[in-house]
Image: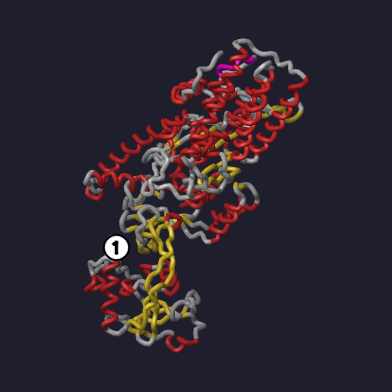
Amino acid sequence: MELPSQYNAKEVEERIYQLWEKSGFFNPDKLPVRKRKIRNSKFEIRNFCIIMPPPNANGSLHIGHALFVTLQDIMIRYQRMRGKKTLWLPGADHAGFETQVVFDKKLEKEGRNRFEIPRDQFYKEILEFTLQNKKIMENQLKRLGASCDWSREKFTLDPEIIKIVYQTFEKLKKDGLVYKGKRIVNWCPKHQTSLSDVEIKYEERNDPLYFIKYGPISIATCRPETMFGDVAVAVNPKDARYKNLIGKEVPLPLTNRKIPVIADDLVDQKFGTGAVKVTPAHDPVDFELGEIHKLESLQVIDARGKLNELTGAYAGLNIDEGRKKVVEDLQKQGLIEKVQEDYKHAVSLCYKCNRVIEPMVLDNQWFVKMASMRDLAVRAVKSKKVVFIPKRLEKVFLHWMKNLRDWNISRQITWGIPIPGDESGQVFDTWFSSGQWPFATLKTSGPKDFKEFYPTDVMETGWDILFFWVARMIMLGLYVTGKVPFKTVYLHGLVRDKDRQKMSKSKGNVIDPLGVIDLYGTDALRMALVVGNTPGSDPIIYEEKIRGYRNFATKIWNASRFVLLQTGNSPASRDLAQRDKKNLKNFKKIAREVTKDMENFKFYRAAEKIYHYFWHTFCDKIIEENKKEPNLALLLEILFGCLKLLHPFMPFITEEIYQKLPLKNKKKCLMVEEWTTP
């Protein structure tokens, strides 16, 4: 059967995806699964499962989504061709805080403010917005070639998923691992919500360090505006300079109050003067000191980031204005001893708006005790029940787990899963619900799915959410099910341009995956995303690279067209002349190497090997040698073998060509053909 002279990616891709969907082979229950003999007369069906990290249903897919879809689809298509009962379960995330941030921007463009919209109306509007985006996103996933089982698709706000989340919350409460209290949290004044520690990013800044006289003691601080919330001055008990002042009181500048001098080993004698102000309501370390020494907590900055009535004449000023005015008044009274202008320190920022985080004590906050769950996760990783690719990120994971604090799962937003029994209307941190994704999806997707597919085989995601999400899934999965949620964690990097710059709209270097698909085809984009992309490293992508793999697709098409023109519509004999056996032996060697790379998650290497073999050996040598007197059996066998090796990477063009091959015992689709085994 003859191929058209040119490959039309757009026409082919839409038609081929419909073929795959109609075949039913995305559903593991409808696959022609091959059984493996294990002993005597017993056979086993091998399973393979990936739970798709649910993309945020708040906008179009970006190049990072294209990367994860490509990598996961490669794994799924490979394992499906190896004869495994293969499930790739898709889903979408309501993405609580992140979606609300996106929706806030939409409202701003419309001249509206969510704080002026009734809560029920706001929730209804954002739900409609999310469901619309969810549908768009699913169609885009299909365009990328995602061979996932849409019949099992899940959404983080599905009633059955919420039920699982509530069951976990009740179990945590029953086991004494959840508590509600008044504690210090990370507060974003712009978004008006608390954030967990992993939602904070740190930026190194140079700020003035003010040395202020508190009577006989000088303290050093970058935040003089919080002094109205000071309840003590702390020194190290081993510091001889202040031994005679411990237990006495010193005057608090700009006020009529006196505060005690306390001693604690937490104080670093080398910082500043060795004496520090203690402001429990506005600093996490100070809050801890306040708890130990039973000190009062005075909040002097409100939720909007303005000084409140406890600051007297400074009330109503924002933080920067308040700091400037306080410093001026301290200088007038001769209370500033000196100023270090270039003090380098890390500043906490909201990861979405880059505004400085304001530590704030809030009541009715829900926290999960992390110590026991942390230990479960650490043991699982150390015992290799969970393996990281690349291995170096295992050390990063274990280091982070050492410093894990109790997890604030309360969010003061409207969009999300309401915390049951919470009178103030708070919702769960989205990572609390999505942290249960592997077992929640499988427990609700089918009667046998959890038993057959849990633990899942691979969790593939970006290294940047190792702590946001992967760690939460391991801890919650072990806690709820007693088993790890996945055996392997494959972490990809962040896509960058050819100058290794992070992609951003402001830089004008963003590549729209759907746009380049229209120009060059999905297969070209997928190859460009894989070749040269080692696990954990940031892949480089640019239009010229994608165009180059479009040229490779053209090469595959033309070579296949040549072979089909020779064979006509008749199946070729598989009898090979002695002179051609060397070529076949060389192909089998390549197939062995590619298979080994696929098994070892070295997809970048497998893709490059089959690319070079097809172009430089099959096209440039074997086809050229066979142009005068073609050995049709050899050409057809190697072409068929190459299409199978290429299929996980370039599924559309390989499937289209396969449908035209004159083969005996052809399957309905290439995607269920048996992998080329050496």
Q: Residue at x 26, y 68 (%)?
A: 321
Residue 476: tell me if it is visible. Answer: no
**Residue reaching furthest right?**
578
Q: Up-down: is 201 above or below 234? A: above
Residue 483 screen position, x and y as percent: 59, 44
Identity of the residue drawn at 46% across and 50% down: 501
User: Crowdedness of circle 1 by 10 Å Cα count: few (<14), some, many (20+)?
Assistant: many
**Residue 562: image location, x then y, percent:** 59, 19
Quadrant in the picture for the C terminus: top right
Work out whether residue 523 or residue 438 is closer to the camera in this orientation and state it.
523
Q: Is residue 55 left or right of residue 126?
A: right
Q: Where's residue 393, x and y in %? A: 58, 52
Query: Residue at coordinates 28% horizontally, 72% vertically from top-left?
Result: 324
Of the 4 image quadrants, the one containing the N terminus is top right
Image: magenta residue range:
659-663
Query: 321 and 87: which one is in front?
Result: 321
Q: Is residue 11 magenta?
A: no
The residue tagged 1 is 305
Residue farthest top in this picture: 570
Q: Is residue 646 left or right of residue 317?
A: right
Mainly helix, strand or loop, the magenta region?
A: loop
Residue reaching furthest to the front: 628
Relative vertical location of residue 307 with respect to residue 259 in this rendering, above or below: above
Amino acid residing under circle 1: Gly
Q: Give the residue drawn at x 43%, y 60%.
A: 202
